[in-house]
Image: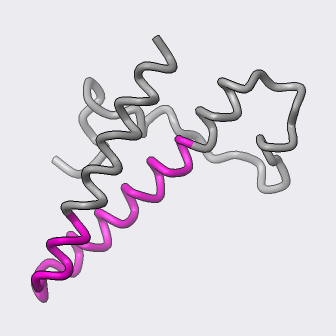
Amino acid sequence: MGVGNAPDRSLLLRVSLKEFNFDPVTAIQLPLSERVLDRLGDILFATDEILDMVATARRRADDSSRDVEDCVRRVYDQVNELMKKLTD
């Protein structure tokens, strides 16, 4: 199973592609929680991409790539947990 594919564990599936010119930081008409969740979704999406990059390069893995993977996975898990708390 790939990263972000466990529906009970990850909120990555809720992250949707958004219109390029939309900026949730300046979109003050949205509640703060919505803007924060949007940015956290960006982080979740980026960490998922990084984990995919590391997994793709695994055949040439070294200690630094393992360190990157461990660190990024912790960030992914922390952001995912925070998003779950904010959406409850």
For the residue pair 48 and 17, the one nearer the viewer reads as 48
Vertical placement of residue 46 versus 56, above or below: above
Residue 11 location, quadrant: top left
Residue 23 x, y percent position in the rendering: 80, 47
> Please, which colouring scheme is shown?
one colour
Vertical placement of residue 27 versus 44, above or below: above
Q: Which region shows up in magenta?
A: 40-69
- Disc tally is 0
Residue 25 x, y percent position in the rendering: 78, 43
**Which residue is pictured at 89% across the width and 26% down the height?**
29
Q: Is residue 65 left or right of residue 12?
A: left
**Which residue is pictured at 42% across the width and 30% down the height?**
82
Q: Main secondary structure of the magenta part?
A: helix
**Which residue is pictured at 40% across the width and 62% down the height?**
49
Residue 6 x, y percent position in the rendering: 24, 34
Residue 41 x, y percent position in the rendering: 53, 42
Q: Magenta stretch containing residue 66, yes or no?
A: yes
Vertical placement of residue 64 versus 72, above or below: below
Q: Is residue 87 left or right of residue 7?
A: right
Farthest residue to the top: give it: 88
For the residue pair 65 and 56, the one nearer the viewer reads as 65
Q: Is residue 11 left or right of residue 43?
A: left
Q: Magenta stretch containing residue 84, yes or no?
A: no
Residue 84 location, quadrant: top left
